Amino acid sequence: MAILVTGGTGYIGSHTIVELLDEGYDVVIVDNLSNSKIEVLQRIKEITKKDFKFYEVDILCKEALEEVFKTNSIEAVIHFAGLKAVGESVAKPLMYYNNNIVGTLVLCEVMDKYNVKKLVFSSSATVYKMSDYSLTEDSELGATNPYGNTKLMIEQILRDIYMSDNSWGITLLRYFNPVGAHESGLIGEDAVGTPNNLMPYITQVAVGKRRELSIFGSDYNTHDGTGIRDYIHVVDLAKGHLKALNKTLNENQIEVYNLGTGKGYSVLDVVHKFTKSTGIDIPYTICNRRPGDVSVCYADSSKARRDLGWEFEKGLEDMCRDSWKWQMLNPLGYE
Ligand code: NAD
Ligand code: WQD
């Protein structure tokens, strides 16, 4: 029996596959390579010394997806495949609703048809209205952009599927700010074009691809005026998927968990820690606030700790060091 990983050549998927293979799971990957490179497969093999199956398939293509279910014995699905750029989703909402929502509908239809009813889904902290600083799974929901809406809508769709048939087991994981890379430096986040997120921007400044970091606002009500977020090492996040998978395989229920560290760091905290752990100065300028940003957001992950037995192990220094190692060894990403 194998675990099907959709979006498995992407950033979080590739790290999760390493953990799955290390734990002895058989893995089947489906990805259309719209935001990832085929080279990642070699890197995963290099790290794990294990083999797995890969299908270049778009999850919107039902026939191709069915073929994967027909030719493999799939036990459960970890569903990462999706588009994730907030700004792009505002400009291209139809593309986001189609890819993320219709893609998930097609996947669930095929799973239902082949009687595979165990699913771990990548949701996001972006589903919260952010009316509190520390967010529990019960905090108020409300997205502010099409990308976030797709995550909220998919969560609702999955709840409805479970309501109609409680032989499903579904786990919704709301990630906070994933950063870092595998300690080997062989896999990491391969940001295409100008990075939207803080850590890849910092590493691109460090490697000389960008001149300086723009810090979006220094007048927030925080200790140094810059925005505070909950950064989580991608390997800790990947390990959270194995804990969630284990529970999903054994219980027929739908549950939601935050995956973050519960510690908030400001933009300047990250910049300073990056310099401390790598010895590289990051030039920056202070700019206006980025529209839509909140001042502070971090996870209360006590539910994941309690129910999944999951705990993060890596701190901000590890996140900076590993992000840098990946960038330094792969200045052009997987190219
Ligand atoms: P990523 O872009 O690196 O990986 C997503 C993968 O899905 C890519 O390899 C892409 O090619 C593939 N894909 C997209 N549409 C597809 C389709 N229709 N068919 C087949 N493959 C398709 O992104 P990531 O950072 O690894 O994120 C994985 C998941 O986690 C996404 O659903 C994302 O929304 C969610 N998430 C990410 C973050 C983050 O900050 N990285 C935070 C919260 C949630
Ligand atoms: C972090 C902090 C910025 C870039 C996003 C998505 C969210 C989720 C995770 C998918 C903020 C500041 C950033 C820069 C900066 N993804 N910043 N200069 O916005 O918390 O979350 O990624 O689900 O949906 O919105 O992450 O890394 O963009 O920003 O000053 O060049 O860094 O203002 O305070 P964010 P981020």
Image (spheres, helix red, strand yellow):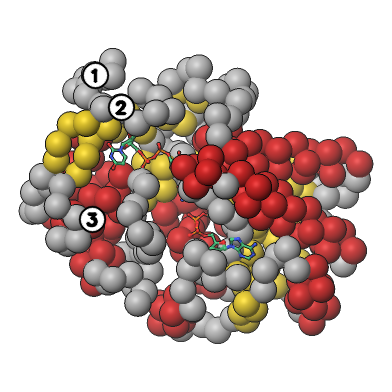
**In-front residue for pair 164/25:** 164
**CA neighbours of label 2 inside 10 A, class few (<14), some (14 to 19), many (20+):** some
Q: Is residue 143 above or below residue 321?
A: above
Residue in front for this viewpoint, 208 or 291: 291
Quadrant of the displayed image that contains ligand 2: top left
Q: Nearer the viewer, residue 1 or 276?
A: 276
Q: Looking at the image, can residue 230 be seen?
A: yes
- Whole-number angstrom distance, CA of label 1 to CA of label 3: 24 Å
How far from the left and from the top, in percent, is residue 223? 22, 20
Which residue has dot 3 on it?
Answer: 203
Q: Position of residue 56 (x, y in %)?
A: 62, 77
Which amino acid type corresponds to the residue marked 3 in the rendered image?
Thr
Numbered label attached to residue 219: 1
| Amino acid, disc 1 | Asp
**Residue 323 at what x, y percent from top left?**
28, 57
Q: In percent of the image, x 19 and y 55: which residue is there?
A: 210
Which residue lies most toward the front here? 91
Residue, disc 2: 289
Any atom of ligand 2 within 8 Å of the CB at mark 3?
Answer: no
- Residue 231 pos. (x, y %): 36, 41
Task: State the SS at label 3.
Answer: helix
Query: Closer to the observer: label 1 or label 3?
Result: 1
Between circles 2 and 3, the one closer to the viewer is: 2
Distance from disc 2 to disc 1, alpha carbons, whole Å, reads 8 Å
- Residue contact between numbered discs 1 and 3, judged by CB atoms under 8 Å: no
Rendered residue at 37%/47% (across/down): 196
- Horizontally, residue 185 falls left or right of residue 156, namely left
Badge 2 amino acid: Arg
Q: Is residue 231 above or below residue 53?
A: above
Question: For residue 134, which numbered disc appears in the image?
Answer: none
